[in-house]
Image (spheres, rainbow, N blue to C red):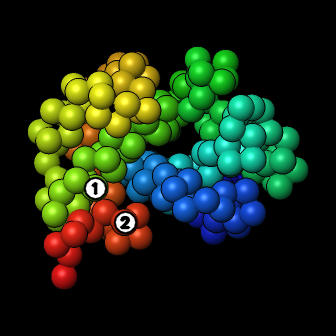
């Protein structure tokens, strides 16, 4: 059965408990929903994949994605969905190459949402009035959000046949409706 948001939340509940990781899951979920809309795909399904993508990271940060496939398989998650999740670590901690639009999107937005989040946190109105131009300016500054791998983002955008700025724009718009949930309303929020 295809992964649903309800099931993804249930599976992550005991595995992802740290606030910053929960927020990251929600950022990626929101961005994946927006990417699904861009590709005319099933938004709820892509959001569920995004939400569940770091399933084993909190418990096994040094062995990320090595403790994902079997537990998800036992929980009844589709092989296609497991493959999508594993592919986001391609070249880093997985040898599963992203092939579908969903896999390529997850590979790309995982890191990109970190830069967007960092940009939004610096603004009085958070993500609500964040422009892609601001994100691209910070994207070029390798010291800003230094933990976010720009080469992975560029590689993912190449796989998608898209410009970084276009993917960033889609992600920003996808994350805006979740601004309160992901702590990106800014300091001037009413």
Residue 82 x/y as whole percent = 70, 40
Alpha-carbon span between mark 1 and mark 2:
8 Å
Residue 30 x/y as whole percent = 41, 56
Q: Is residue 4 visible?
A: no
Q: Residues within 10 Å of mark 1 (few under 14, many from 20)?
A: some
Name the mark on residue 69. Answer: none
Q: Is residue 169 visible?
A: yes
Q: Is residue 16 left or right of residue 187?
A: right
Tag 1 secondary structure: helix
Q: Residues within 10 Å of mark 2 (few under 14, many from 20)?
A: some
Q: Which residue is mark 1?
A: 121
Comparing 79 with 139, the one in front is 139
Residue at figure coordinates x 75%, y 63% from the top left: 14
Q: Is residue 97 above or below residue 4?
A: above
Q: Is residue 40 above or below residue 161?
A: below
Q: Is residue 187 left or right of residue 21?
A: left
Q: Which residue is mark 2?
A: 183
Residue 144 x/y as whole percent = 29, 34
User: Cβ–Cβ below 8 Å for labels 1 and 2?
Assistant: yes
Counting labels gives 2
Q: Is residue 144 left or right of residue 75?
A: left
Q: Residue lying farthest bottom?
A: 190
Q: Residue lying farthest front?
A: 143
Q: Quadrant of the C terminus?
A: bottom left
**Disc 1 or 2, which lies upstream in sequence?**
1
Q: Is residue 152 left or right of residue 170?
A: right
Tag 2 secondary structure: loop
Q: Is residue 115 above or below residue 127?
A: above
Comparing 130 with 167, the one in front is 130
Residue at figure coordinates x 84%, y 47% from the top left: 71
Q: Quadrant of residue 132?
A: top left
């Amino acid at each position: 059965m295809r992964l649903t948001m309800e099931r993804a939340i249930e599976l992550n509940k005991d595995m992802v408990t740290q606030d910053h990781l929960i927020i990251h899951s929600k950022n990626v979920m929101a961005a994946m929903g927006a990417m699904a809309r861009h590709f005319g795909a099933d938004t709820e399904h892509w959001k569920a994949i995004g939400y569940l993508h770091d399933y084993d990271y909190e418990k096994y940060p040094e062995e990320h994605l090595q403790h994902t496939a079997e537990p998800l398989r036992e929980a009844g998650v589709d092989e296609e969905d497991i493959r999508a999740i594993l592919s986001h670590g391609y070249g880093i901690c997985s040898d599963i190459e992203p092939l579908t639009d969903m896999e390529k999107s997850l590979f790309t937005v995982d890191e990109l949402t970190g830069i967007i989040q960092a940009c939004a946190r610096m603004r009085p109105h958070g993500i609500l009035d964040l422009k892609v131009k601001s994100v691209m300016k910070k994207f070029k500054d390798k010291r800003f959000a230094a933990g976010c791998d720009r080469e992975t983002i560029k590689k993912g955008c190449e796989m998608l046949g898209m410009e970084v700025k276009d993917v960033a724009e889609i992600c920003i718009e996808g994350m805006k409706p979740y601004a309160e949930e992901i702590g990106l309303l800014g300091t001037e929020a009413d």
